[in-house]
Image (cartoon, rainbow, N blue to C red):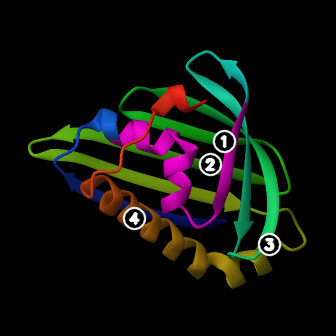
Amino acid sequence: MIHGEGEAFIKGVTAQEVFDFVLDPAQYTKADTKIVDVVKLGDIPNGMIAREDGKFLGKFPGSVITRYQWKPPYSIDVVLEHGVPKSMHAWFEIEDREGGAWVRHVEEMSMPAPLGRLWDLTTGGWFAKSVKQEVAEIARLLEAGERGKGIAAH
């Protein structure tokens, strides 16, 4: 399994603004180098089923079907429903703090055998770095005044 995570304190924003930014594909794709688009396929209680289109290692296109569940504005949880990975789980933890908001983002992915271990060895470093950069870019964009539409973007 490959794993990446990052966290940031974002000055001058609320947890709701972080939540809205992350759920807005037009904004989120500015920060995430792996995701090209997120398209809602259907509503579920406290979430949605979506197709995520992306480029792994910045080169290889592909799509997965994911289940988003949220508790506005404090958490977003995303799990794989259908696609090539054996498993995929990503989540955001968001808190209001004095002077801004704190966010922690974690992503984990595993591939099926027999390539799973080779996959982990060859992509793990890139994956970990990309998630850390994603969180830093979310913070930079929000501090620069970018805002998202949240659930309404879907």
The 10 Å Cα crowd at callout 4, few under 14, some 14 to 19, many 20 or more, is some
Which callout, 3 or 1, points at the residue further toward the start of the chain? 3
**Kind of element beneath mark 1:** strand
**The label number, if any, that marks residue 137 in the structure image:** 4
Q: Are marks 1 and 2 in contact (CB under 8 Å)?
A: yes
Say if residue 85 shows up in the picture. Answer: no
> As drawn, is 37 to the left or to the right of 90?
right
Residues at marks 2 and 3, CA–CA distance in whole angstroms: 20 Å
Residue tagged by mark 2? Answer: 89
- Disc 4 residue type? Glu
Residue tagged by mark 3? Answer: 60
Q: Position of residue 123 (x, y in %)?
A: 67, 79
Which callout, 3 or 4, points at the residue further toward the start of the chain? 3
Q: Are marks 3 and 4 in contact (CB under 8 Å)?
A: no
Height in image: 22 above or below 125? above
Pick the front one: 91 or 38: 38
Q: Is residue 66 magenta?
A: no
